[in-house]
Image (spheres, rainbow, N blue to C red):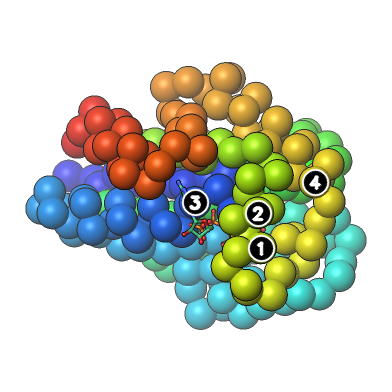
Amino acid sequence: MRGKFITLEGIDGAGKSTHHAWLTGFLKSLGKEVVATREPGGTPLGEKLRTLILSEPMHLETEALLMFAARREHLDKLIIPALTEGKWVVSDRFTDATHAYQGGGRGLKHEKIAILEKWVQESFQPDLTLVFDLPTNIACERLARTGNAPDRFERETSEFFDRVRDAYLQRANAEPHRIKIIDAADSIDCIKKKLEEIIITVC
Ligand code: ADP
Ligand code: TYD
C-alpha cells in the first residue's frame, strides 16, 4: 500500500523544523516507516541547489525554476520511490512554499507557477499539509533568539513575510481538506496534541 506524503509549511521561524522532528518520531511510534526530508533539498543535487538558492541573489523566475528543478529531482529520487515502498514521507516544505514565497512574497504570477507545478508534478499533491501560522513579528523574534545568521529569505522585510503568510492562509482556505492551519503561537505541547489529533485522521 502506498505511504502518505505530509508537508509542513509556514513563514520562517513559525516552528516547522521543531515539529518536523517531533512528527517523524511520532509516526515511527505508530509503526510507520518514515522518511524525513526538506525542500529545497532532499537529494545530493537538491542540497547543492539549496546552497545556491539560499545565498545567491537571482531573478525571481530563476528562483522559481531552481525550486522546481530541485523538486523534480526530489520526487524522482526520493519522494515517489519511498511512497511506492509504503513509507511515509514528511517534508519540511513543498510546492505550497513556492506559491507563498515566489508568488505571494515576490509577486510571481500564479499562472507561471501553475505551469511549472503541472510540468513537474502533474496531479501529484501532498496527502496532508500543515501550515504553521504565526504573526510575522513573533516569528522574527523567535528567529532572532536562535542567534543563527539569517539566509537570503530570512533577511526579507516584515511586509514580505506578511504577504507570504497571507498566501498560505488563502491556499488553506481554498483547500481545507488537504491544508490544515496550526496556530503556531500556541505552546509546543499544545501544538503536538493538535498534530496528534490531525495525524490520526489520515492514518
Ligand atoms: P522554522 O523551522 O519554521 O523556521 P523552528 O522550528 O526552527 O522554525 O523554530 C524557530 C525557533 O522558535 C526555535 O528556537 C524554536 O525552538 C522556537 N519555537 C518553535 N515553536 C515554538 C513555540 N510553539 N513556542 C515557542 N517557541 C517555539
Ligand atoms: P527552510 O528550510 O524553512 O529554512 P531553514 O533551514 O532556515 O528553516 O527553507 C529555506 C527557505 O527557502 C525558506 O526561507 C523558504 C524558501 N523557499 C521558497 O522560497 N520557495 C520554495 O518553494 C521553498 C521550498 C522554499
Labelled disc at residue 141: 2
Q: Is residue 84 above or below residue 193?
A: below
- Give the image quadrant in which the ligand numbered 2 is located: bottom right
Q: Please, what is the three-letter code of the amino acid marked with disc 1? A: Ala
Give the residue number, with chain letter if any, for mark 3: 15
| Residue 197: quarter of image | top left
Evaluate if marks 2 and 1 touch, with contact meaning CB atoms under 8 Å apart: yes
Residue 200 lies left or right of residue 159; in this view the side is left
Q: Secondary structure at mark 3?
A: loop
Residue 163 coordinates in the image, percent (x, y) = 77, 37
Residue 28 lies left or right of residue 160; in this view the side is left
Q: Please, what is the three-letter code of the amino acid marked with disc 3? A: Gly
Evaluate if marks 4 and 3 touch, with contact meaning CB atoms under 8 Å apart: no
Residue 87 coordinates in the image, percent (x, y) = 23, 55
Instruction: Give whichever of discs 2 and 4 has the lower sequence position.
Output: 2
Instruction: Give whichever of discs 4 and 3 has the lower sequence position.
Output: 3
Give the residue number, with chain letter if any, for mark 1: 144
